[in-house]
Amino acid sequence: SVNTRRLSCYERRRQARTSTASAASLRALRKETESSPSSSEADAVGGAALEQVEVGVRAEDSVEESSGVGVSDEERERETELERESESKWKELVSESEIVGREKSEALERDQRYPLWFALPLQPGERRVTKRYEVVENQVYSFEQCIGTLDVIVNIRMTVVVLSGGGLFVHAPVAPTEECLRLMRELEEIHGEVKCIVLPTTAVEHKINLGPFARKYPKADVYVAPRQWSFPLNLPLALLGLGFRKAEIIQEDGDYPWTRDFDYTTLDLTVGIGPFVEVAFYHKKTRSLLVTDTVFNIPEEAPEVCLVDPMPLLKRSRDDKRDAIVDTKENRTRGWWKTTLFAIFFQPSSVEFDITGYPVTLNWRNEEWVEKVKSVQNRLLVAPILQVLVYSRDPLGALDYLQRIGRWNFQRIIPAHFSIVENTGPQDLRRAAKFLMEDSAVKNKRRKDLKGLPDLTPLLDWFQDRAAEFMAKNSKDGDASSAAAAQQQPKEDYPESELQLLRELTNFLTVTGIAGKAPEPDE
């Protein structure tokens, strides 16, 4: 603490006097003491004791100034007496400061506990640290926690938007720990109470938090994406945590209290055993696009919330489980890079799986993975599992959804995972959706629509991209480097070697009937 640092300086000055230090060394120590924070900035604990010590030492300083070398015998006796009187108070000050610090730490950890974590038993388990960020001043806030399994830990994001009529709009709620609720209360004191809670997806990692979060705000209206389902039993929302609370299903042309602030559109695909549904929101005032899993942007560095407990990253940083765990910035970054590969590809091609080597079953056999990670960082992309497994079930429906989003004039994308993308726009979303334009079903529909006329779509896309780049270069808010960066991006979204496992998984799910058949191309 501040008090402890100042007392340390005073103690060293007394030792210097006892050892008949020179005037120069005494003056140096006095200067160091005076350069430390003043008692008015110090901790409240033990403040009175510290003031008493300061008065005595400064009196001693005045004697030093007059003599120029040290203190007299009378002053040394006075100093010794003062030390006897204040020694116990110094110890009490340090002890109480340590106790206060420990109590604060324990209280914070209690606030971070989430007793319902076992409903979906994923890492990090019971402790759910929450980090809050202001995305747009006094308008949009991000709340981040961690989620994952097998030491593959990423961030999960809840977005809170201030409504124009006052109150808060909560998108994709996270675990309502006491820490999270305290951060929410701070916003409520400024902007008003929570009015709307929205579950924008059917994905279980987001759905699991809806009921517990909504129960903390009984006056708020609850809205959910359509076609909610669960596996293996398709339970109603009442049995998924909402109880008797009414949740309104979001309809494509519905009229809701938040439609004054938001435009929205829905992706509704059927993938084998259940639907894949997501509602995207466009906040008109801040030009912010809120999505769940539609697109993502992988940062080079791990999100702050993933560094609170760096152990999963440090474990992932190793090439062999028998390697020692060493906590360095380099290893944290290396662990994050490997984590992102596991998160989006499940099993990177550079990893060798050998069950006979248990417990050392996964080994990194080469460094080719480094360039593969770099190729997917800082790019707006559709997740490979969505490209290969989900969107391939209905490429026309997926493309229509992305094109509807592309009509909004957004400048920021806030996904539920990885990083928020600033200085972006519809042209970047079109680039992310280009893989769909190569799908045979999309090509055949385009040919039918053209009825023998030449396909000008590539030319139109080229002109749209050039126009967007021109606007970015000449806009006050635009990022002039984004156009150049786009030109340097790889032609393919992902290395084919990394998609092999996903393609095999898709084929297996299709053959077994779990994922349903992809549409046959019409000739």
Image: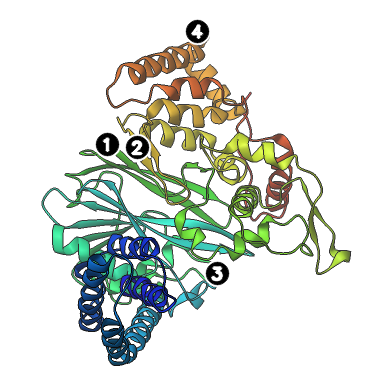
Disc 1 vs disc 2: Cβ atoms closer than 8 Å? yes
Q: CA distance from mark 2 to mark 4?
A: 37 Å
- Can you tell which mark lies on residue 412? 2
Q: Which residue is mark 1?
A: 287
Which residue lies at the image location 46% right of the left edge and 27% below the top edge?
430
Query: Is residue 300 toward the left or the right of residue 239 in the image?
Result: right
Relative to 371, say whether 159 is above or below: below
The quarter of the picture where residue 325 lies is: bottom right
Q: Secondary structure at mark 1?
A: loop
| Mark count | 4
Disc 1 vs disc 3: Cβ atoms closer than 8 Å? no
In terms of sequence position, does the residue under pointer 4 or pointer 3 come before the other?
Answer: 3
Give the residue type that dot 4 points to. Leu
Q: CA distance from mark 2 to mark 3?
A: 30 Å
In terms of sequence position, does the residue under pointer 1 or pointer 3 come before the other?
Answer: 3
Q: CA distance from mark 1 to mark 2?
A: 7 Å
Relative to 498, say whether 187 is above or below: below
In terms of sequence position, does the residue under pointer 4 or pointer 1 come before the other?
Answer: 1
Disc 4 vs disc 1: Cβ atoms closer than 8 Å? no
Disc 2 vs disc 4: Cβ atoms closer than 8 Å? no
Q: Secondary structure at mark 2?
A: strand
**The one of 485 and 290 positioned closer to us in this rendering:** 485
**The one of 115 and 394 positioned closer to us in this rendering:** 115
Quadrant of the image containing the C terminus? top right
Which residue lies at the image location 51% right of the left edge and 62% below the top edge?
147
Give the residue type that dot 2 points to. Arg
- Can you tell which mark lies on residue 453? 4
Disc 2 vs disc 3: Cβ atoms closer than 8 Å? no
The quarter of the picture where residue 227 lies is: bottom left
